[in-house]
Image (cartoon, coloured by chain):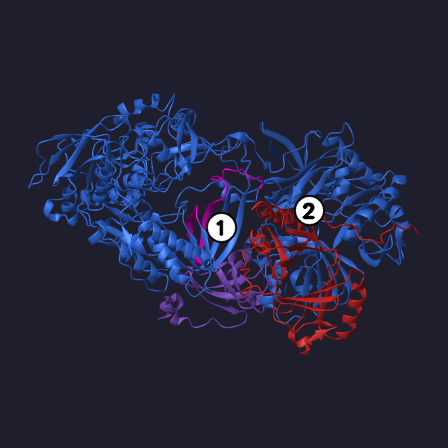
Chain colours: A red, B purple, C blue
Amino acid sequence: MLEVNLAKRAPAVFLAEQAGRGPIDIVLQPTMGRLSFRAKEAALEGRSEVSGLAVDGAINTRRENGDLAAMRLGPDEWMFLCDDGEVDNLAERIAEEMSGKAFSLVDVSHRDVTFEVSGAASDAVIASGSPLDLSLEAFPVGMATRTIFAKSDIVLARLSQTTWQVTCWRSFATYVQGYLADAAKDFAVA
Amino acid sequence: MLLLECPYCGKRAESEFHCGGEAHIARPETPAELDDQAWAEYLYYRTNPKGLHAERWQHRHGCGRWFNALRDTVSDKVVETYKMGEPRPDASNANIPDPAKVRSA
Amino acid sequence: MSQPFRIQSGGHIDRSKPISVSFNGKTLNGYRGDTVASMLLASGSHLAGRSFKYHRPRGILSHGSDEPNALLSVDWRPEKGKGRRDPNNRASVVEARNGLKTETQNHWPSLERDVGALNDILSPVFVAGFYYKTFMWPRSAWEKVYEPVIRRAAGLGEAPEVADPDRYANRHAYADILVVGAGPAGLSAALAASEDGSSRVLLADEGFLFGGALLNDATSTIDGKPAKAWVDEMVATLDARENVVLLPRTTVFGYYNHNHVAMVERVADHRDDALEGLARERLWQVRAGKVIIAAGSHERPLVFENNDRPGIMLAESARAFINRYAVKPGNRMVVATSGASAYRTALDAKAAGIAVTIVDIRLGEDCGTELAEAREAGIEVLTGHTVVKALGKARVTGLIVAPLGKTGGVGTRRTLECDTVAMSGGWTPSVHLFSQSRGKLVFDADIDAFLPGQSVQNEVSAGACHGIYDLSAIIADGAKAGGGSREVTASATFTGFQPVRVLPTDEDPKKVKAFVDFQNDVTAKDIKLAVREGFESIEHVKRYTTTGMATDQGKTSNMNALGLVAGLLDRPLPAIGTTTFRPPYTPVTFGALVGPSREERFEPVRKTAIDGWAEAQGAEFEPVGQWRRAHYFPRSGEDMHAAVNRECKAVRTSVGIFDASTLGKIEVVGPDAAEFMNRMYTNAWTKLKVGGCRYGLMLGENGFVMDDGVVARLAEDRFHVTTTTGGAARVFQHMEDYLQTEWPDLDVFITSITEQYAVIALQGPNAKKVLEPFVSDIDMSEDAFPHMSVREGFICGVPTRLFRVSFTGEAGFEVNVPADYAAAVWKALYEEGRKYDITPYGTETMHVLRCEMGFIIVGQETDGTATPDDVGLSGLVSKVKPDFVGKRSLSRPDILRKDRKQLVGVLAKDPKEVLDEGAMVVDDPTAPVPMPIAGHVTSSYHSSNCGRSIAMAMVKGGRDRIGETVWVTTPKGFTEAVIATSVFYQHEKESIDA
């Protein structure tokens, strides 16, 4: 059988320009395992976690557990994140644990791309395209939500007061990165 | 741009939402039993009130959930939003004439 | 140019920073803090433009954004090349700095000598509604003659001729309280609103200095301090508060639903340093808990003959130029007024060394303390006088005034020589934003003004825009609006005026040009004519005369026009109503509205994982929705036609490789997945075996074809659904809607995997040979892996969902691989395929090949009104299932009509002729117009495999008309064609399963 060296995943996006000037950093994150997990309340039977991933958090919160993270994006929808090489193992464990229950687990590791946006004015850069209230009161650290950024759907998560994760589908990544980088220009010169 | 209260996510800008027209029009259980007129009414006939209107909205670019909203078509004030499956709330305290009630009265 | 009219001390200009700007090629000198208008006045000139219709010389009327006359074309950075020339800037608000290049507009060959001024002499032609009356006939002349001529002659500034090279930024923001305007009311409101230390307060003002009317005020004190000192103290206090953001140079221009407010911040134009990368303007979209409108008021001009002559300005504006900019508007001033506030201008002018006379319409007994104060200062005051007309042309030289008789007549004329007139017809509160918020206006006869009445959104007006004109009361009103209270002791303000619409005159009113709307050149005579011709609604008068319809939205003219119409109709003013104020409050650049969304950020350009390879191969691309797809792969010297012919042949004779990644893909998972599929698609799914594929047809509830695609069953409870490229999002939302709202009891979840998998299509007799060496864990034998099935295994060592399907009629595969691996897998397959002369093909070839087989494309053959039977797919509609989305509609009478359009083939009589897609199909090309239409062409190509042109069409009753002759429209007429079946290509042997 012919083999091709695919040990490493190819870069997901072609950056239009070097990310983030000045005090704003826009950094493409390494590839990771991503599983879209869906289950209704009845199927979860009151459990607080599934294979170490929290499912009892409020809608639009992000919970971490070691190398794992769970973002609850809707009443019956979670995005599970893990290391790139762990996704199949994790999927198996979840399937086993949820066996017999009505649920859906779909691997979307290659669908999504994440940028980390950080810097003192990072909220203003996000606010260039996001209609959300980004104050700490309205968007506290640990919040994660699907939303709109300019003309792209994104999942926006706040890791610290000045650190954000912006996740979009791969074909929107060049657009999202370009829009963020353009907004960051204001803070490179101010 | 409206500010809508998603019953799951709270207040969000209209650009995250998609409007799906008049609410509380359930798909008939057995369409085959409907005559042509009744089916046409289900498909195409909608009210267009001046005043309170129950509408379907989807938080499309958010949690993705459909919900209903009572909106005053005159002022664009959204009196209440509520989850799918819940009955249309009584908005008699909203200080907005409810055309459904005006008609039946 | 020197500054003969500059006052040597005072004003809010920085004399340590001298600047110069270019004005019509000449140099104007001034200081930081000046506007171009104040620099022009300092030079001794008032001439700042030509009027819109009559090309009359015009001066500077106002000191604010309501200026109608002095419109400049400004090149903000001439040193940086073309594209920064920006028309229609108001000279009165253009913040001056070194290097600005400004030009007046609307004249030829020069401002001083303008040929267009002939219009002033021909003015009887240009009466109200003259466009409607004059250019009616002949109709054909409109486009060729009248419109181009009118456009050239009228119009304001010229649009720039190159793309705007500047950056524009966008910002969403939230505020608990947004304060609009930083005059005494706004400052006071912001201070009160931010007192708690936690409420987020935004304070925006269109000017570059905060203080509003207090900047024009050299005499008032507040709590013993000069007004400007009070302002500075307030601003410093606000600036020190963490919860306050101060935004100077920021115009709040639009008030939308749910307290969504739009404003534009001018970020860079005023800066001496042209910082690379800094946005020129920033659009703010603010969602405010509460909006406090402290927008002030506009002064009304007096309406008398030649009231538009340069040198005639609003009284408060004259005061602003004297006190704020330290500029004398002239040496000899007549203050013409119907109210008290202009007396302050007279006193300040006198103090600045200007000779002043006051002409007041009011009788002495109707005046307040201002009269005595003026006379005490030694100013001559003529009470009970009207202004008959202004003298002079390029500059006012005098004013003819006359006493008003007790019975209404006009007495003996007297000429007052002057070089400046400061006029005041009273005040109009700026209710624009309140009105935009949909609040209801109420008329207050005491101050002759419309005021904010019932609110619709959470806002409150404060200060002058609230009808409050006394300084202490304004500050108290602001504090109250901000949720606090503030009592100050401030100098008393001269308030009160007598409403006057058109000043009484003894001239023949038919010959008098007394301007109501300066920017659109509308005179009192025009409005009278409109009323005489039967226009009574103010909305109609407005459109017929164009009063209030210029870029200044009639800020200075609306009340005079309304009052005039009310008087002519002898109705109370509120009965006439007021016109609707719409955003923007002042003109906004397109750049600010577009913001970053231009060029590569105008729209996301979605590229597949294989796009880079295609680009390197020299592919031509086409947009398909947001996607960019390879259209064809020309070899050197090939045009599209040649490339597509070659690609089409290659697929049928050997093997082609195609990037199908953009196809929509949805994973449908859950115990009820099959039941859900049964309800969403016309086909039956329960019996589809795991590993099997089926072509699925989806209808809307109206019974019309909505989408199609191959569906694979991966497990009992898991389907991999494909959709059209353009339908991906629509189908997903359609499914989600039914799942959530109609069948929440079903245990099914859908997830978009469009971008999880890239799809590599290998099509052609050699497809399998290319693929096989790379595949592991899948039995590739015919029996184990037949046509229309799916297997999961590995390709090149990475996981794949391998589909054995065909959209070309050839044996083929669609290789789904996780997207990050796709480019490498593609390259491996391509290298292996070289043994068989593998040919990459694009969307055009894909379209031709499927058309040769008679396969439809949803959205090309169907247009949202085609049923499955219309496109020959009734075999895919289950007759057994009791219900699915759209089923009931298929038995509606209109759907069962025999004469519905049906999908057929259409072959041009001349096999070389490729019909136009969208062309009409008719039975009789000689039939009279309107000709009965039999149908239309939906797809049309040259087919190298068929050796001729082929086309599909939707034709009424078409399936019963095979073999009949029809005529198809062409750009030149009609061409003959024959109706055929829609399968054009026949394989010599069954190859798809071979």
Above or below — where is C193 with respect to C230? Answer: below
Above or below — where is C542 with respect to A102? Answer: above
Residue under pointer 2: C856
Q: In the rendering, at what x and y percent does residue C448 appear?
A: 22, 50
- Please state which of residues C959 and C237 is positioned toward the viewer in this rendering: C237
Q: Which three-letter amino acid code belongs to the residue tagged 2?
A: Ile
Using the rendered image, report if marks 2 and 1 lie on a common chain: yes
- Please state which of residues C454 and A157 is positioned toward the viewer in this rendering: A157
Q: Is residue C257 magenta?
A: yes
Quadrant of the snapshot with the N terminus of chain C: top left
Residue under pointer 1: C284
Q: In the rendering, at what x and y percent does residue C892 appear?
A: 56, 57
Q: In the rendering, at what x and y percent does residue A139 appear?
A: 57, 63
Q: Extreme bottom residue here?
A: A46
Crowding at mark 2 (Cα within 10 Å: few <14, some 14-19, many 20+): many
Above or below — where is C754 with respect to C338? Answer: below
Mark 2–mark 1 distance (CA, rounded to whole Å): 47 Å
Q: Secondary structure at mark 2?
A: loop
- Residue interval drawn in magenta: C248-277
